[in-house]
Image: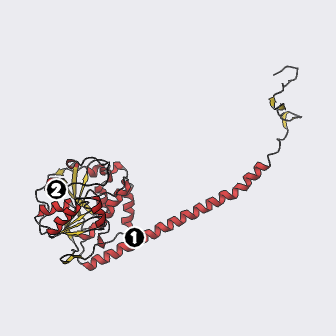
């Protein structure tokens, strides 16, 4: 299913929710990781694998690359330029019969191709996966709300590509800023429920190295990382049954996105018009201010100090460029 207006409003409230509101949701016990997570017969989609060292370790973990579909957000040339060891990892995955894709957006999984041409012929990408794995998602920007939006959009996209009992596995560090992304809230807003939290066991994936393009990044600390396991709330979002259902969901999502873009454009136009009116009003008031400066106000009217007696406020006299204040005399000759 695509997003509805109710989903969109829920999304905005979740992204802007204050930190304290999610504290209770984030407190869950962490389970030990079993030695075998992914079986050889399961279809596994890996998203955002930087140098593909995780996917190479996943192939070793499963004993085969069949059923492994691993992707990068970057293009193939970008991956090679960023990570010198990427070509070796990619070759290992392909030699084990895994499929490697580039230029894949984790928030637009309905756009995955149905078939991919490889050196050994056409390979079919399944409509649904048993597992969708997204390790250490990051938008590339150190902004909490942007990374919350990334998670929310990912969950909404992944929901339509899972089998009936399929799972989403997202691994994150349990320290700020990552803990402030409130992953459980983003998942719930997209129709998921958390099944469990597992301690991330890097040893299950031989040769895996967490990679980042940030030169200021600290040393990787796997003991502070947790894998969140989510499943779709099927009472609200029944599973898709066919490619036709996926296509219909894709059309609905595209229509929803187009509507959001239309609303955003209308809001921008409205703001621009308001700014233009405000600017026009400011300009119209400017000549009046100039006229006031050119024509100073008239002298004040006589001030009545005593009944029947009129006096004018006496201005200081100027002598040779200096101010001179005269003495004032009161009745009876006394100075003050």
Query: Dots 1 and 2: beta carbons under 8 Å?
Result: no
Circle 1 packing at 10 Å, graded few (<14), some (14-19), many (20+), is: some
Q: Nearer the viewer, residue 94 or 168?
A: 94
Dividing the picture into quadrants, the one containing residue 45 is bottom left
| Residue 46 at x, y percent in the picture | 22, 64
> Which circle marks residue 9 in the picture?
none
| Residue 153 at x, y percent in the picture | 33, 64
Who's the residue at 46% across and 70% down the image? 262
Q: Nearer the viewer, residue 65 or 283?
A: 65
Circle 2 packing at 10 Å, graded few (<14), some (14-19), many (20+), is: some
Left or right: where 160 falls relative to 300 = left
Q: How is the image coloured?
A: secondary structure
Q: CA distance from mark 1 to mark 2?
A: 40 Å
Q: Earlier along the polypeptide chain: callout 1 or callout 2?
A: 2
- Residue 74 seen by the camera: no
Left or right: where 158 falls relative to 205 = right
Left or right: where 122 falls relative to 283 = left
| Residue 41 at x, y percent in the picture | 12, 69
Q: Examine the rendered structure and indicate whether residue 106 appears above or below residue 207.
A: below
Q: Secondary structure at mark 1?
A: helix
| Residue 205 at x, y percent in the picture | 15, 57
Q: Quadrant of the C terminus?
A: top right
Who's the residue at 37% across and 69% down the image? 4
Q: Nearer the viewer, residue 40 or 244?
A: 40
Q: Secondary structure at mark 2?
A: loop
User: Badge 2 is on which residue?
Assistant: 207
User: Badge 1 is on which residue?
Assistant: 257
Dividing the picture into quadrants, the one containing residue 271 is bottom right
């Amino acid at each position: 299913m695509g997003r509805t207006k109710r989903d969109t409003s829920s999304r905005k409230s979740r992204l802007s929710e204050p930190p304290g509101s999610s504290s209770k949701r984030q407190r869950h016990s962490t389970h030990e990781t079993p030695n075998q997570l992914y079986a050889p017969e399961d279809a596994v989609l890996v998203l955002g694998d930087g140098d593909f060292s995780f996917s190479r370790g996943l192939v070793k973990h499963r004993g085969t690359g069949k059923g492994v579909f691993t992707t990068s957000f970057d293009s193939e040339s970008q991956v090679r330029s960023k990570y010198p060891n990427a070509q070796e990892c990619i070759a290992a995955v392909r030699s084990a019969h895994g499929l490697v894709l580039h230029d894949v957006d984790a928030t637009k999984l309905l756009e995955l191709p149905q078939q991919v041409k490889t050196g050994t012929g056409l390979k079919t990408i399944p409509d649904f996966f048993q597992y969708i794995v997204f390790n250490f998602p990051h938008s590339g920007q150190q902004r909490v709300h942007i990374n919350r939006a990334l998670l929310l959009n990912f969950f909404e996209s992944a929901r339509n590509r899972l089998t009936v009992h399929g799972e989403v596995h997202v691994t994150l560090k349990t320290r700020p800023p990552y803990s402030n992304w409130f992953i459980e809230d983003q998942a719930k807003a997209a129709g998921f429920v958390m099944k469990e939290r597992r301690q991330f066991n890097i040893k299950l994936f031989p040769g895996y190295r967490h990679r980042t393009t940030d030169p200021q990044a600290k040393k990787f600390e796997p003991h502070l990382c947790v894998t969140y396991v989510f499943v779709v709330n099927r009472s609200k979002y029944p599973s898709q049954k066919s490619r036709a259902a996926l296509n219909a969901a894709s059309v609905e999502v595209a229509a929803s996105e187009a509507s959001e873009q239309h609303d955003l454009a209308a809001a921008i136009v409205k703001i621009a018009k308001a700014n233009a009116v405000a600017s026009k009003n400011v300009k119209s008031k400017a000549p009046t201010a100039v006229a006031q400066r050119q024509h100073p106000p008239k002298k004040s009217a006589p001030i009545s100090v005593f009944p029947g007696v009129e006096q004018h406020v006496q201005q200081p006299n100027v002598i040779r460029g200096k101010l001179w204040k005269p003495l004032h005399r009161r009745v009876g000759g006394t100075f003050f």
